[in-house]
Image (tube, rainbow, N blue to C red):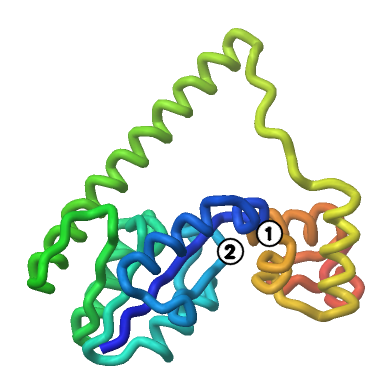
Amino acid sequence: MTKYGYTRVSSKSQENNSSLEGQKQQLIEKGILEKNILVEVGSAANEIKNRPIFQTLINQKLQEGDVLVVTIIDRCSRNTLKFLKLQDILFKRKIEFISLDLPHSDDPGINRLIATTLSSIAEFENNRRKKRQAQGIRAAQKQGKYQGRKTIINKTLIQKVQYLKERKNLSVIDISKLTGVSTPTIYKVLKEHLGYVSNRLVKPEETNEPK
């Protein structure tokens, strides 16, 4: 049996602060070797296939009888359905999943039940928070106080994305990882600022599409 830890932060700025170090320390205190702790930068909203570190952990490293440990359940997913699919994959492969923010026991079946239940509650609370935020934004808009979120797209980011795409021929996912910017934002830069069209991300002159 091998214990693996998975840590995730949403951006490069978080990677350099105490959030990541705190996660790693908690996992080490639970007996997980540092070499078996995998680190990823990316949103939990991304599917597993768009989180290469997590995908490698699930598909290549974890074996029957191993244990996957995270500090908080949403390091894996913030969506209950996606989490249940992941949990089912692990259960069928006889891999135990433990989230340190949840109660857990020596019985894998009980751990599965607890994780499933609390994942549903976590998603419910997250949706409630989003609704409250939306209500607050609408109220601020009516009062003329809401200015919207400040965009992170600037000249430096546009130049960096252009270089990585056109000179290094990197994928959107790889560009996102290197810049610490979400994939939707990278797509926006490519389409709205660099002239790429469609999800195939080609320039108009490379297609028969009109400019």
How crowded is the residue under tag 2: few (<14 C-alpha within 10 Å), some, or many (20+)? many
Write down the residue under mark 2. 41
Write down the residue under mark 1. 180
* Residue 172 percent coordinates (x, y): 70, 70
* Residue at the spot 36% in from the left edge and 41% down from the top edge: 126
* Residue 39 percent coordinates (x, y): 53, 70
Q: Compute the Cα span from label 1 to label 2.
A: 7 Å
Per the rendering, the mark at residue 102 is none
Secondary structure beneath dot 2 equals strand
* Residue at the spot 60% in from the left edge and 8% down from the top edge: 143
How crowded is the residue under tag 1: few (<14 C-alpha within 10 Å), some, or many (20+)? some
The quarter of the image holding the N terminus is: bottom left
Amino acid type of the residue tagged 1 in the rendering = Gly
Q: Is residue 65 or residue 197 the one in the foreground?
A: 65
Occupied quadrant, residue 50: bottom right
Residues tagged 1 and 2 counted as in contact (Cβ below 8 A): yes
Q: Is residue 72 left or right of residue 179?
A: left
Secondary structure beneath dot 1 equals loop
Q: Is residue 126 above or below residue 171?
A: above
> Of all residues shown, which one is farthest toward the top?
143
Amino acid type of the residue tagged 2 in the rendering = Val
Q: Is residue 106 or residue 211 the one in the foreground?
A: 106
* Residue at the spot 8% in from the left edge and 72% down from the top edge: 107
